[in-house]
């Protein structure tokens, strides 16, 4: 256990067990049926540790505290005082669970060591280990420089807990909680005090028909549809935040990836009728699921710091912030068994992994360990990939993007072409990539343009904004009506899906931007898939957006939130698609033949004739170039994964640029596989199990696969963003020049850069932050003021501390009454003594 868990929860470290926090009601319930376990919890952090204003009351304040059922009716009963709970010791005696120390004293611990205690201290006795006890530290003492236990005081705790919304004032407890930046009503304690969080970025559920196996969940009996659960990416190097569920107060809480499944199914004829397909939730969100949760990794000192949740003064956490806010980092993305390559003359799907789990990339260190025989054969064959399926271009395949069962292709003179690839792994199909899976007369999977150069999708996740929603009164409402309602009025309390996700965005060399409705591809209706231009041709000539020729010679497009970043031969043009059918230009910046752009949180990265250039895209929709760039001789494309930008640099191979500080990038390394990688046109990054890979469209050389990290060969493979050590492990000779590789599936992206949710959350009412909430984390004045930066250490002096008493108000009142009675008694005795003296 000590080897597996690098930081114990502080409660576990102190010797506590589950029952020392979760008492009878939490364990056995209270007769109420809840829709999730956390809703049934009565205990909260402040019940034992108090707040910055008052010490612990030992009265449960959790979601289910006092709730009960009597005569089939809900009721608010009496909340049990934890100070009255007793339990039996080994001798049968009754022991108080909590004790409040009335005067300074010493008490021996379970090892016989004397521990100094002060009046007002709260101790808790272990319900499991006889003689074990611990002092319960009070939050109020951690911010008090004059705390009776000096070791309890922490300047960092005081800094975080008393910081006000102006990002300057700290040290004192303000009269109004609304002045506090991190107030209890808005944040869970463990949002800051969780030292690490697990994340499961992908699980492959593979079902096989006609295979007799015992039922998995111990319900008895057998099944003939056996499903295996194959975990793909388990990591603990990420930290993400969002809004907790309704029943838990919608407070800020840690978020983890969970149930992010891909599914495959093999029929009784051993035919894979679908392979590694993503799911869509009932509300239309992607099935790459996220959840708010309690990590149970609480620490007192190894906590989250200011720069874990706000922009750092040194500007070195741009990638971390993108991860924190669930915007994705392109690091744990899923490529799968097939790599889709646009090779000029054709669309090709190249087999790159083993079929069975673990689906090791061919030529990788994982294949060497899990499939040693296959690995040896692959190496002997020259590391050449052999299996692939293709469809001839119509007439070209210049760029490709896979999403779900469809591959979207920019086909030059052929315009936009959509290919059905649902049967790519189906041996019963002679044509595995098709243009009309049902009938050519039953659908239209193309839109003609003069010369389509690229197609942009708002997300690689399957998101369906056309789903109807159910309200609390049982009505089904259209997406437009649902957007006008508050989430609380909807049955599942989900936020609306932005309508921009209903469209594909095609850029054409001559026509500019063309918007195509693709939502019908997700609605399950095979009769309405007639793709066409959606812009009003009465307002936009030929139903294309190209005001004054601003988008003429467009060559690439990247969508981030409600903005499309389009490169032309002259400049970068930012187009707002907040209203997809009424686009408008937001900004333009001149470059020398820009070819591609990548966006990460507050910054973008543009490749042009001079190299890789950093642009500032905050606030969203605006763009500024300050002359920051890394000179590169032959930059063609750029892909950003956490703190590294990977540039396809033509004859020079792949340039890896360190962008941990986006405004101060540096060239980390250039890799060309000893000259073999010499025509790099595009690069994409994806993770398989614990290793990172680069998939390179290497022009005349075809597809190249590089292994970037390996736990078997790299001591530094772990962590948030390990330095890559590229090795060429596999190649495939394409029909024509390999021009582009499809972007992998986003696995850590729950919302876009504009605060629009795109992935489902597992708790009712839970969600990522919206745009206004993000702004409050970046700007003063409740998100309307200046942008601010933070440091982990205070940069100014604190206000003078006027703390609360060690005793709570009830104890203090009792003490004052006692003093008053004593003084009154003393004065009365003096007067009585004088009378007796005069009489005598």
Image (cartoon, rainbow, N blue to C red):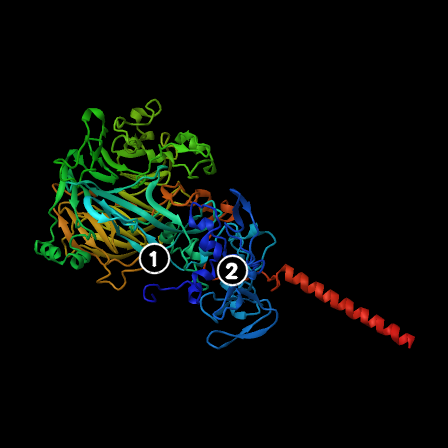
Q: CA distance from mark 2 to mark 1?
A: 27 Å
Query: Looking at the image, which is closer to me, 82 or 674?
Result: 82
* Picture coordinates of residue 142, whole percent (x, y): 53, 64
Tally of numbered tags: 2
Residue at the limit of the structure toward the left, as seen here: 381
- Side (left or right) of 302 relative to 67: left
Q: Of label 2 and label 1, which has the lower sequence position? A: 2
**Quadrant the C terminus occupies:** bottom right
Q: Secondary structure at mark 2?
A: helix
* Picture coordinates of residue 110, whole percent (x, y): 47, 74
Q: Give the answer, above or below, for where 163 lies relative to 513.
A: below
User: What residue appears at the point 74 percent right and 65 percent down from the top-left corner?
Assistant: 820
* Picture coordinates of residue 362, whole percent (x, y): 16, 52
Query: Looking at the image, which is closer to me, 200 or 308?
Result: 200
Q: Is residue 789 visible?
A: no
User: What residue appears at the point 31 percent right and 45 percent down from the top-left corner?
Assistant: 598
Q: Give the answer, above or below, for where 471 lies relative to 674.
A: above
Q: Secondary structure at mark 1?
A: strand
Residue at the limit of the structure toward the top, as seen here: 538
Q: Which numbered disc, 2 or 1, marks the residue closer to the eye?
A: 1
Query: Looking at the image, which is closer to me, 524 or 518?
Result: 524
Q: Quadrant for residue 345, please give it.
A: top left
Crowd band around label 2 with a 10 angstrom C-alpha radius: few (<14), some (14–19), many (20+): many
- Side (left or right) of 337 relative to 822: left
**Quadrant the N terminus occupies:** bottom left
Query: Looking at the image, which is closer to me, 808 or 184?
Result: 808
- Side (left or right) of 53 relative to 15: right
Check disc 2 and report the residue beneath it.
159
Q: Is residue 58 visible?
A: yes
Check disc 1 and report the residue beneath it.
236
């Amino acid at each position: 256990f000590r080897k597996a868990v690098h930081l114990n929860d502080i409660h576990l470290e102190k010797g506590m067990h589950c029952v020392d926090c979760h008492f009878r009601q939490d364990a056995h319930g209270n007769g109420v049926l809840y829709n999730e376990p956390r809703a049934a919890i009565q205990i909260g952090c402040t019940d034992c540790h108090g707040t910055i204003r008052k010490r612990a009351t030992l009265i449960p304040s959790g979601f289910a505290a006092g709730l009960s059922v009597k005569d089939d009716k809900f009721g608010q009963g009496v909340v049990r005082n934890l100070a009255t709970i007793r339990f039996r010791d080994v001798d049968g005696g009754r022991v108080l669970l909590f004790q409040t120390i009335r005067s300074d004293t010493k008490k021996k611990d379970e090892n016989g060591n004397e521990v100094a205690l002060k009046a007002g201290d709260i101790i808790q006795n272990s319900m499991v280990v006889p003689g074990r006890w611990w002092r319960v530290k009070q939050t109020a003492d951690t911010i008090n420089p004059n705390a009776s236990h000096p070791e309890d005081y922490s300047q960092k705790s005081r800094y975080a807990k008393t910081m006000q919304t102006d990002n300057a004032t700290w040290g004192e407890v303000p009269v109004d909680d609304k002045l506090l930046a991190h107030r209890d009503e808005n944040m869970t304690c463990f949002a800051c005090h969780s030292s690490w969080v697990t994340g499961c970025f992908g699980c492959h559920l593979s079902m096989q028909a006609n295979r007799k196996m015992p039922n998995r969940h111990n319900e008895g009996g057998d099944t003939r549809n056996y499903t295996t659960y194959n975990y793909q990416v388990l990591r603990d190097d990420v930290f993400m935040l969002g809004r907790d569920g309704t029943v838990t107060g919608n407070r800020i809480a840690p978020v983890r990836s969970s149930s992010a499944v891909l599914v495959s199914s093999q029929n009784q004829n051993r035919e894979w009728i679908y392979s590694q397909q993503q799911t869509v939730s009932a509300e239309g969100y992607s099935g790459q699921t996220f959840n708010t949760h309690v990590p149970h990794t609480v620490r007192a000192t190894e906590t989250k710091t200011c720069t874990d949740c706000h922009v750092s003064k040194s500007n070195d956490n741009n990638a971390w912030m993108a991860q924190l806010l669930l915007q994705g980092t392109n690091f744990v993305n899923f490529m799968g068994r097939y790599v889709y390559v646009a090779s000029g003359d054709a669309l090709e799907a190249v087999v790159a992994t083993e079929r069975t789990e673990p689906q090791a990339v061919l030529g990788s260190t994982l294949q060497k360990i899990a499939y040693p025989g296959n690995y040896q054969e692959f190496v002997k064959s020259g590391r050449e990939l052999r299996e692939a399926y293709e469809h001839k271009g119509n007439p070209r395949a210049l760029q490709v993007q896979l999403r779900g069962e469809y591959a979207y292709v920019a086909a030059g003179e052929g315009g936009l072409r959509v290919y059905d690839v649902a049967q790519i792994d189906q041996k019963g199909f002679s044509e595995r990539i098709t243009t009309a899976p049902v009938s050519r007369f039953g659908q239209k999977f193309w839109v003609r343009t003069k010369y389509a150069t690229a197609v942009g999708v708002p997300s690689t996740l399957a998101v369906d904004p056309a789903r109807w929603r159910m309200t609390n009164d049982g009505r089904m409402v259209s997406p437009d009506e649902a957007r006008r309602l508050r989430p609380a009025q909807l049955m599942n309390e989900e936020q609306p899906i932005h309508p921009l996700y209903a469209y594909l965005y095609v850029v054409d060399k001559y026509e500019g931007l063309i918007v195509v409705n693709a939502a019908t591809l997700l609605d399950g209706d095979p009769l309405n898939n007639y793709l066409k231009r959606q812009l009003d041709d009465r307002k936009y000539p030929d139903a294309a957006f190209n005001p004054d020729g601003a988008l003429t010679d467009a060559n690439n497009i990247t969508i981030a939130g409600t903005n499309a970043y389009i490169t032309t031969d002259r400049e970068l043009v930012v187009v707002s698609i907040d209203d997809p059918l009424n686009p408008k230009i937001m900004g333009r910046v001149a470059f020398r033949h820009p070819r591609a752009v990548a966006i990460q949180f507050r910054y973008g990265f543009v490749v042009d004739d001079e190299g890789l250039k950093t642009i500032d895209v905050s606030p969203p929709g605006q763009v500024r170039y300050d002359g920051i760039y890394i000179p590169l001789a032959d930059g063609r494309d750029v892909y950003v994964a956490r703190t590294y930008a990977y540039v396809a640099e033509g004859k020079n191979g792949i340039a890896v640029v360190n962008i941990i500080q986006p405004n101060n990038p540096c060239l980390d390394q250039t890799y060309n596989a000893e000259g073999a990688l010499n025509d790099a046109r595009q690069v994409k990054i994806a993770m398989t199990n614990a290793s990172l890979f680069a998939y390179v469209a290497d022009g005349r050389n075809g597809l190249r696969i590089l292994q970037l990290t390996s736990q078997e060969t790299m001591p530094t493979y772990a962590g948030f963003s390990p330095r890559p050590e590229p090795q060429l492990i596999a190649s495939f000779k394409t029909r024509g020049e390999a021009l582009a590789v499809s972007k992998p599936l986003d696995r850590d992206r729950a919302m876009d850069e504009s605060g629009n949710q795109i992935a489902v959350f597992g708790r009712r009412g839970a969600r990522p932050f919206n745009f206004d909430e993000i702004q409050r984390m970046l700007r003063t004045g409740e998100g309307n003021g200046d942008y601010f930066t933070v440091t982990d250490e205070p940069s100014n002096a604190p206000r003078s501390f006027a703390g609360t008493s060690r005793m709570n108000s009830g104890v203090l009142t009792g003490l004052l009454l006692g003093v008053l009675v004593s003084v009154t008694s003393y004065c009365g005795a003096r007067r009585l003594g004088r009378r007796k003296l005069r009489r005598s």
